[in-house]
Amino acid sequence: MVYDTVIIGAGASGLAAAAFSKGRTLVLEKQARPGVKVLASGGGRCNVTRAEPIDRIMARFGRFGRFASDALRIFPPEEIRAFLRRFGVETAEEDGCRVFPASGKSSDVVSAFVSAARESGSEIVTGIRAVNISEASERGLRAVSADGKSFHARKVIICSGGYAKPSLGADGAMLNFLSGMGVPVSPVCPALCPLKISDPETSGIFSQLSGSGCPQVEICAGHGAQTRGPMLFTHTGISGPAVLDISGQVSESVMKTGRDAVLKLSFLPSVPRSEMPAIFDRWRMHHGARSVRGMLSGLGLSDALSAALCGLCGIPRETKVSGLTSGCALALADLCCGMKIPVRPDGGWEQAMVMRGGVSLKAVNPKTLELRNFPGIRCAGEILDLDGPCGGFNLTWAIASGRLAAQA
């Protein structure tokens, strides 16, 4: 039997490709059910897309964001939401931009795409692992080898993802296969992952804050990499949206240099470092009898973080403002507005939400997602060297690229 299309992988991009594929289509998924990683996304709620223009979405993918232009124009966020609505899934916005199924269930998103795939005539086979793609004996066809079987198709779409979350089936096998074929592959590393603080003293103090966080932190990683948002403390380091968003740059730096990356944290992003001496002067003038820790809490820091920062500066817990020495004040200002900490990725691939790196975009036609030197083979989603911040960006790209690969 000859298929018009064989799709490898039934994650977000694979299901989207199956939903819009025409002709006889076969989807091969190595897991026992489709959409396993989608089911786990967003804490089981699935931040499926964004409520903002595609130009702003592309900008958040960095200097390669324009590559996603054709995919996002063929399936922009409003069209993704309309598609889900057609299959009975209403969506709702949170924080002005993030879009979730109104039910709060990621399973509804997966069910919608599976229903659409079946409506289009696509056949989804689970528990079967594709291992090889070769030229078939018939001209213009590709042969996909999977568990001892061979499936011939005019077009193969690889939607198998990368290495992130091996417990959910990720193994990078098809990425390795493509590299072996001679397809250029950019070095890969974990992204959207927590970070481990390498300095024992800082790690020890901050570990006592595990489970608490800061509503707004500005993080700089050098070379212009900067982000702002909520941050959480963990028992080994830091996490939360702001940390996840910059973790890809950290992973890439550690991979290239073999050394820890150094982050600069501002726990008071709205307060310039230059204003801190004047703030301390006002404290001394009007609040000399109050504790330094209490005054820091008044600036918006939690009591626990205030105590931790004081501890790192050698300021006893109940020190009064009147007893704050100029040296300790200088050190405290530096920590509040520009604390430097050595970090590296924490937890490896299992803790990463996505993979940074993958099939080089130079090897792919952005209008079709076909490999330039291998006609009939297309790639979509995470396997490509394009990753964005957390908040629905990567799912938007996966879904849109899946549709483009199927239709173009």
Image (spheres, rainbow, N blue to C red):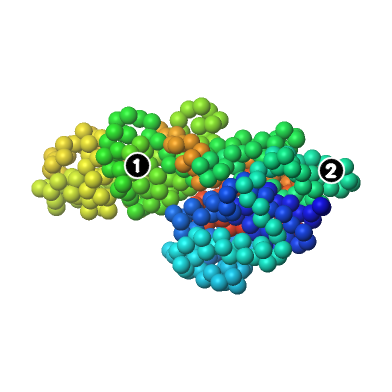
Q: Tag 2, which secondary structure?
A: loop
- Residue drawn at x 43%, y 42% is 194
For the residues labelled 1 and 2, say whether their Cβ atoms are less than 8 Å apart. Answer: no
- Residue drawn at x 66%, y 52% is 125
Disc marking residue 136: 2
Q: Quadrant of the C terminus?
A: bottom right
Q: Is residue 334 visible?
A: no
Front-most of residues 241 and 307: 241
Counting from the top left corner in percent of width and height, residue 35 is at 57, 54
Q: Earlier in the sequence, mark 1 or mark 2?
A: 2
Disc marking residue 29: none
For label 2, count other residues whose C-alpha is less than 10 Å away and answer few (under 14), some (14-19) or many (20+). some
- Cα distance between the residues tagged 1 and 2: 52 Å
Point out the frontmost of discs 1 and 2. 2
Mark 2: amino acid: Ala
Q: Is residue 208 above or below residue 37?
A: above
Counting from the top left corner in percent of width and height, residue 38 is at 54, 54
For label 1, count other residues whose C-alpha is less than 10 Å away and answer few (under 14), some (14-19) or many (20+). many
Q: Is residue 288 visible?
A: yes
Q: Tag 1, which secondary structure?
A: loop
Counting from the top left corner in percent of width and height, residue 186 is at 64, 37
Quadrant of the rendered structure where residue 355 is? top right
Counting from the top left corner in percent of width and height, residue 164 is at 54, 42
Q: Is residue 189 above or below residue 141?
A: above
Residue at numbered disc 1: 234
